[in-house]
Amino acid sequence: NAGVTQTPKFRVLKTGQSMTLLCAQDMNHEYMYWYRQDPGMGLRLIHYSVGEGTTAKGEVPDGYNVSRLKKQNFLLGLESAAPSQTSVYFCASSSRGSGANVLTFGAGSRLTVL
Amino acid sequence: DAKTTQPPSMDCAEGRAANLPCNHSTISGNEYVYWYRQIHSQGPQYIIHGLKNNETNEMASLIITEDRKSSTLILPHATLRDTAVYYCIVRVALTGNQFYFGTGTSLTVIP
């Protein structure tokens, strides 16, 4: 059981380049989330999804776009990367109902924007 | 969601119980207390949650005061592998929307 898988694990971009982070979960979870974590800080919610075809903004959505075309996948896109987006990105998922707040996280994707 | 307050850092001797406090004085009657931890740069890991009663699982115990304004996460026999940042979060159950992490408590287990 893989749980939550994030690809790629590491990426270096130049300012202005675009990229997509992929999150895949095999637990049939309804809810999925993208967080970023900067050094010495807690996690901040970027976007989340409560079901296939739906997305919503979190605390820090600017500069990012997301899509949830399939229930098991949640994509995070950077259209024009900026150095301020250098961070570790975590994806998470959870089930509906009483398990809604029990999040399962991926291992993280470390992004550096030069 | 109710705001939580945690000390920024704590130390604990290996083999002793680690008691991590959390204040949530504005908690509502339908809000649960959740605890997560993050070891080094891994993704956070769910530990335990509770509403009113004390809870225990294979990882930890959660003690919630009678007025529910504070709680304590107890790691009964701390090991070096328990060194991590511990997050206390108050949430209404059954919701799958925004779930916020603060800065947590950095626990260092000392040999």
Image (tube, rainbow, N blue to C red):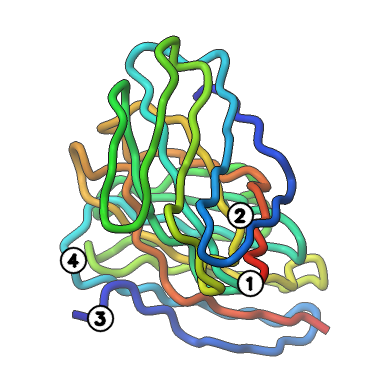
Element assignment for label 2? strand
Q: Residues within 10 Å of mark 4 (few under 14, many from 20)?
A: some
Q: Position of residue A59 (x, y in %)?
A: 61, 42
Q: Residues within 10 Å of mark 3 (few under 14, many from 20)?
A: few
Compared across the picture, whether A46 is left or right of B30 comes to right
Element assignment for label 4? loop
Compared across the picture, whether A106 is left or right of A114 comes to left
The correct choice, above or below, for B100 with respect to B94 in the image is below
The three-letter code of the residue at mark 3 reads Ala
Q: Earlier in the sequence, mark 3 or mark 1?
A: 3
Measure the alpha-carbon separation of dots 2 and 4.
Answer: 23 Å
Badge 3 sits on which subunit? A
Tags 3 and 2 both on a single chain:
yes
The correct choice, above or below, for A53 with respect to B21 in the image is below
Badge 1 sits on which subunit? A
Q: Quadrant of the C terminus of chain B?
A: bottom right
Measure the alpha-carbon separation of dots 1 and 4.
Answer: 23 Å
Residue at numbered disc 4: A27
Tags 2 and 4 both on a single chain:
yes
Measure the alpha-carbon separation of dots 4 and 3.
Answer: 9 Å
What residue is rendered at 49% in x and 59% in y? A34
Q: Residues within 10 Å of mark 2 (few under 14, many from 20)?
A: many
Q: Residue A88: which disc? A: 1
A87 vs B68, nearest the viewer: B68
